[in-house]
Image: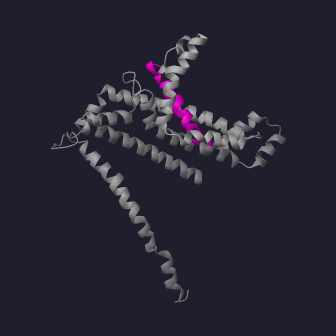
Amino acid sequence: MTTLERPRTRRSRGVDRTFYAFLLPGLVLFTLAIALPAVMGVFYSFTNSVGFGSYSITGIVNYLSLFGDPTIRGAYGFTIGFALVTVVVVNLLAFLLAIGLTARIRAKVALRAAFVLPMVVSGIVIAYVFNFLFSNSVPAVASALGIGPLSTSILANPNLAWVGIVIVTAWQAIPSAVLVYIAGVLAIPGDVYEAAALDGASSFRQLVSITVPLTAGYILINVIIGFKNFLNAYDIIVGLTNGGPGTSTTSIAMSIFNGFSNGDYSYQMANATIFFLIAIVIALLQLRATRRKDA
């Protein structure tokens, strides 16, 4: 190596100062809007603060109270159960729709555009529309047809209200999952299917032995992202049941928000901290799954 080449090599290994200039505004906003409030929230979870005025340190009292609170346990149970059921419904239907929309059918481009429409409508608007349907249209049709269980609104039934929430949430979430699955299916080389067809594999066998294994990474990403999003369910539940009947459909996000307005500031900060840790674990799983797919 000549003496003239050494300085050029050192400069190429350094980081341009322009990089820091672009990074700084984002770093400041992240610190002020996310990191600092999160740290303050964790601190207040160890106090008896009501959100203003003086307070004192109480240690882990709020955390111990959370585990003994049946309302909080019910919110976690409903939210996790709702997220598990919804992620199965969404991904199963989205995968089947993606298979259909990538097949050789007419007007598939127009159908793909139609499936994207629910993504651009606000969740609270969708919830109020379906609230009217579940409370008026569906009972009227069911009564005319003599279907007894549906002659009254399922949203007023503590045992069935969650079904309506799953239906509406899936209706809004399926389009985005379909787009991911379409990308995965289209990434599979056509030669693989042609070779399988020459070997006599049926369409179902090609689906099970080719499509599903080669889109496993997309399935995993959709499942993890969907589960994380469904854990944060709020607007659709507010528009449909507002957490009722009773507290049968109260999610974790709703319990935290309602607790703030009822003066349980530090108590719900402890609840939010636990929920935040759960979200971090899911995010790490998502990151690990993404890296495996890229590897």
In this view, the residue in front, 148 or 140, is 140
Q: Quadrant of residue 62?
A: top left
Where residue 120 sits: x, y (%)? Answer: 54, 43
Q: Which residues fall within the magenta stretch? A: 155-178
- In the image: residue 139, left or right of residue 188: left
Q: Does the magenta stretch include residue 175?
A: yes
Q: Is residue 6 magenta?
A: no
Where residue 63 sits: x, y (%)? Answer: 27, 36
- In the image: residue 256, left or right of residue 110: left
Where residue 117 sits: x, y (%)? Answer: 59, 40
Q: Which residue is drawn at 39% across and 63% down?
A: 25
In this view, the residue in front, 243 or 195, is 243
Q: Which residue is drawn at 52% across and 31% down?
A: 168
Whether residue 85 is visible here, answered yes or no, is: no
Q: Is the magenta stretch mostly helix, strand or loop?
A: helix
- In the image: residue 32, left or right of residue 153: left
